[in-house]
């Protein structure tokens, strides 16, 4: 493993501190163990051989023992301590380099081992960031693939209709209607993609104002009845007289409309759709229930992903972006959305918006 600058800073500073401490302790011990001078007496002058002191080792060598011992021990501990701090930092550095090179699956949690300190927390934070980044990149790649796939079919039909118009001019009226329908589908797709892009970048937060949610739902329901009446379906409203929320009225209108139109589209003929609003803990809880077949339990979360279609969705029945836009709108407003199946027959979408 390559030892970086931080390793050597920790190592040298800790080692120097230990060396200085060892020298100070050694000098102090050496000074305290100095023998007092020999007594100056007449007997000592007359009989110097009797009073001579036994030989001692050189005094200057005495402090070198604790100094050398402390230096060796501190060298080992300084190395281990510096390595303890430098290794996870080096691991994080290599992980950041891997992420920058496009290796989005890189994680460092396992390399941190059983550490329980700030560096370990930093490693787990890195893993969460890397996972979120990987999901975003994969989501954008999937979105690009799905958009290309969705545009390919209507463009192919437009090309075929254009060729037929040249070969069979007598069918121009029929082919013109087909071309207009495909152009309308492409226009709807582009409009939904632009809305989704605005929500992802937070543009919808720029225009917020208080508005009456009950009145908005009433207007959306009136428009939805134009699609429900030909099927013999009814829309029953259970709304308070007034319910004020703060947000972007057009985005909230679109979020509610997407869910309600889905309910009308999937309801069997002659059935009723229930729209109810309650207040709970500072939120407006909007529930839209239909009596359709619902979705598979495993799809209750997936239906909010871009371009996802449940198994019972008919061809050309939207592009699978309506519920995605609804979820993004509610998240932008600090709310949430979830779906559930209601017994044998029925489906409900629950939306929450802060009051």
Image: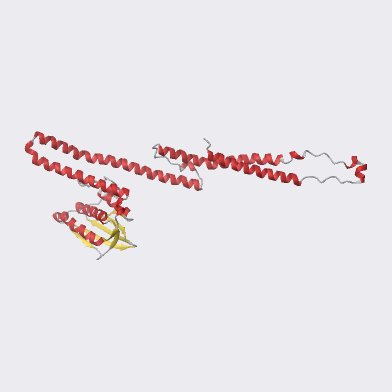
Taking the spot 56% from the left edge, 39% from the top edge, the residue there is: 8
Q: Position of residue 22 (x, y in %)?
A: 67, 43
| Relative horizontal placement of residue 171, taking residue 37 as reference (left or right) | left
In the picture shown, does residue 193 fall above or below 350? above
Residue 309 visible in the current orientation: no
Query: Where is residue 287, by image quadrant?
Result: bottom left
Taking the spot 9% from the left edge, 41% from the top edge, the residue there is: 174
Which quadrant of the rendered structure holds the C terminus? bottom left
| Relative horizontal placement of residue 84, taking residue 195 as reference (left or right) | right
Q: Residue furthest toward the left?
A: 170
In the picture shown, does residue 259 fall above or below 238? above
Query: Where is residue 58, by image quadrant?
Result: top right
Residue 280 visible in the current orientation: yes
Q: Nearer the viewer, residue 276 or 322?
A: 322
Count of numbered circles on the image: 0
In the picture shown, does residue 105 fall above or below 301? above
Q: Position of residue 254 (x, y in %)?
A: 24, 53
Q: Position of residue 239 (x, y in %)?
A: 24, 63
Q: Nearer the viewer, residue 6 or 76?
A: 6
């Amino acid at each position: 493993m390559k030892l970086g600058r931080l390793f050597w800073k920790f190592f040298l500073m800790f080692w120097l501190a230990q060396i200085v401490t060892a020298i100070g302790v050694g000098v102090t011990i050496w000074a305290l163990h100095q023998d007092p001078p020999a007594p100056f007496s007449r007997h000592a002058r007359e009989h110097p051989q009797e009073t001579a002191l036994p030989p001692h080792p050189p005094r200057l060598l005495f402090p070198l023992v604790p100094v050398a011992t402390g230096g060796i021990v501190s060298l080992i501990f300084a190395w281990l301590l510096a390595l303890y701090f430098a290794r996870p930092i080096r691991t994080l550095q290599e992980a950041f380099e891997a992420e920058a090179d496009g290796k989005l699956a890189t994680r460092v949690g396992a390399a941190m081992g059983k550490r329980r300190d700030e560096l370990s927390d930093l490693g787990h934070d890195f893993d969460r960031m890397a996972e979120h980044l990987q999901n975003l990149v994969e989501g954008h790649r999937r979105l690009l693939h799905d958009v290309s796939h969705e545009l390919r079919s209507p463009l192919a039909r437009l090309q075929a209709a254009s060729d037929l118009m040249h070969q069979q001019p007598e069918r121009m009226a029929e082919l013109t209607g087909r071309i207009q329908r495909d152009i309308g589908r492409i226009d709807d797709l582009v409009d939904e993609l632009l809305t989704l892009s605005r929500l992802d970048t937070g543009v919808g937060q720029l225009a917020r104002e208080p508005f009456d949610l009950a009145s908005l739902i009433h207007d959306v329901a009136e428009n939805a009845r134009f699609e429900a009446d030909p099927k013999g379906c009814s829309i029953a409203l259970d709304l308070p007289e007034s319910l004020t929320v703060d947000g972007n009225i057009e985005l909230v209108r679109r979020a509610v409309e997407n869910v309600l139109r889905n309910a009308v589209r999937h309801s069997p003929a002659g059935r009723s759709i229930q729209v109810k609003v309650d207040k709970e803990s500072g939120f407006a809880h909007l529930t839209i229930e239909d009596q359709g077949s619902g979705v598979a339990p495993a799809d209750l979360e997936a239906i909010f992903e871009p371009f996802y279609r449940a198994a019972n969705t008919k061809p050309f029945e939207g592009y699978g972006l309506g519920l995605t836009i609804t979820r993004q709108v509610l998240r932008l407003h600090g709310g949430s959305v979830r779906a559930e199946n209601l017994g044998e027959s029925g489906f409900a979408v629950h939306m929450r918006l802060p009051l």
